[in-house]
Image (spheres, grey):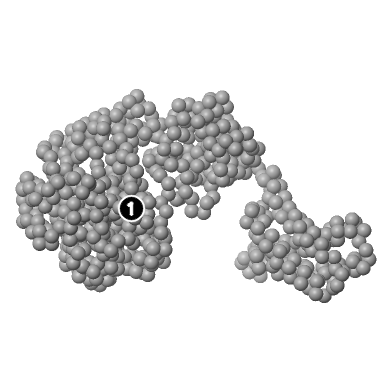
Amino acid sequence: MAVPGTGVLLNTAARRAIVIAVHLALWAASLLAAFQLRFDFHVPREHAQLIPIWLPVLLAARTATYYQCGLFRGLWRYTGARDLASIVVANTLSTGLTTVFVVYGFHGFPRSVIAIEWLTATMLVGGARFSIRLLRHRLAPPAPVAPEARRQRVLIVGAGDAGEMLLREILRSHAARWEPVGFLDDDRRKLGEHIHGVRVLGAIADLEAVAAARKIDEVLIAIPSATGAEMRAIVEHCKAVRVRFRTIPGMGDLIDGTVNVSQLRDVAIDDLLGRAPVKLDMNAISAVMRGRVVLVSGAGGSIGSELCRQVCRFGPASLLLVERTENALFNIHRELVARFPEVHLVPCIADVADARRISELLGRHRPSVVFHAAAHKHVPMMEWNPGEAVKNNVFGTKTLADLSDRFGVERFVMISTDKAVNPTSVMGVSKRVAEIYVQALSQRSRTRFVTVRFGNVLGSAGSVIPIFKEQIAAGGPVTVTHPDMRRYFMTIPEASQLVLEAGTMGNGGEIFILDMGEPVKIADLARDLITLSGFTPDVDIEVRYTGVRPGEKLFEELSVDAENADKTGHPKIFVGRFRPHPWEQVKRHLEELAKVSDGQPAEIRRRFAEAVPEYRPQHVPEPQAPAAAVEKLSA
């Protein structure tokens, strides 16, 4: 009676036996060849008598070292550079063992045979494996393709490692679909060279001419380290000749360093604004996070959820996900359970302004690190509902900070915004008041309270990119408030990683400012997104200006003149030194705000102006009629 799975085991055992037998034959052949080459194919009898003695020793040593290196388990059809390196190591070790036996056991042994045998064994074994891979590639049936489909002529931008891997994948598995025509690369030393038979035709600036002359159907961008400016230039060339263009992920997403066709995707707006990958001090972050209890407030939000993902990478003892929106908490908890099953996750439905609930959570779990990302962030909403900004942004922060001090939290990191600098909006001034309170409290607490300030993040909930995409999908118009409106942008992972890095710095009281690069015109952002969606701005999709919204500035700032922004150990993180605010004065301002939190908007703005003299409130009209309001809120 057959045992289930026996056939598979026998097949595996039989294949393993054949593999070992082939290796034994190759090693024997390499030894015989070494003797023949050493003596010009006339081996003296006294040396020929040594072969039967040396051969069993060599075969035993080789078998043992190849087994330890796992060289009997690999599939030859997938042989690569790593296998060749393992063969060299195994041959070197086994030759060394055999040499010790031969040199000490037999005087007069021709030692040059040892070196020749090592070389011939490496060539025979490596050649056999690569021959099987090449043969399989030659005999493999072409990928299925529709009879009426024409092979797409593709141009690969980037003749580096990523471009080579992409070309190899196309030639191996997608040759029936794509015809690689050439490479473009700005390294002039590569001009005219061939990679797997495909020539480097010119520089990236030649894209338009090459694409037109060679009748290119699609451009594949294989430069994972490309900056936003470089990617924008490539896209502009592609747009000029109206060819489709796609790219591979950036360095931060290519975890294993390999590139394949399945990773190709459309160029996203993040690619045009992105910069070099963030380099983190992994040891410093790990020292703060690993084995500790970490709490993230606003865990279901854009920044909060990404902070949770990043924290999980460093192996905390447990992670408290504090979020008042049930669905948002459910989604991030489900994702983290699947991605990080080894991390102890504690989902907590809670409002940071609820002192009793927060006290119970901190008292029970005793976190060492708190990341405070919970806040109301939409500028027009807070202009129309300023009391809620007071309750959540100011007193939610105060509650969490006070209780973190009481329960001995080691580090408290508050997420702030560029809108807190010279604020003109309720949202901005509420975050500035929260900054002031956290700074003042840090002077009286053993907890290290720090603030991290940055601008807009791409793709966050309710931000401009998702809204633009909705408008484009609806056929337009894409609404922008003002042609000169500019904002700083950063990707969500980039911002979250820098927040983690900044959280390891400082002794308390610092406000860390993230380098956001150059500000971007919102109108340019809208036109880029329309183009990436396959349309022509102001032809297929209209860009319409609707006027500046309540509380908005044309330009945001990340620091003020009174601040002395110093460099830190990280090139993208600066620290602002502020004039400390007297504790009693800070307490008095908060007491006055508490009295008016349910009062009239004008009174709330007046109290904010007393607490933050640089605050310049704007006239806020009442919400408009539904149709106009939807259009106004969209940019």
Q: Quadrant of residue 530?
A: top left
- Which amino acid type is marked by label 1? Lys
Q: Does the image show residue 346?
A: no
Residue at (48, 30) in percent of width and height: 243
Residue at (56, 40) in percent of width and height: 159
Number of marks in the image? 1
Judge from the rendering whether residue 378 lies leftward or rightward of residue 212; answer left or right. left
Residue 593 pos. (x, y %): 9, 55
Residue at (29, 36) in percent of width and height: 522
Residue 233 pos. (x, y %): 44, 34
Q: Determine whether the residue tagged by mark 1 lies in a helix, strand or loop.
A: strand
* Pick the front one: 10 or 434: 434
Judge from the rendering whether residue 6 lies leftward or rightward of residue 385; answer left or right. right
* Pick the front one: 511 or 275: 511
Residue picked out by circle 1: 567
Above/below status of 519 relative to 42: above
Quarter of the rendering occupied by the C terminus: top left
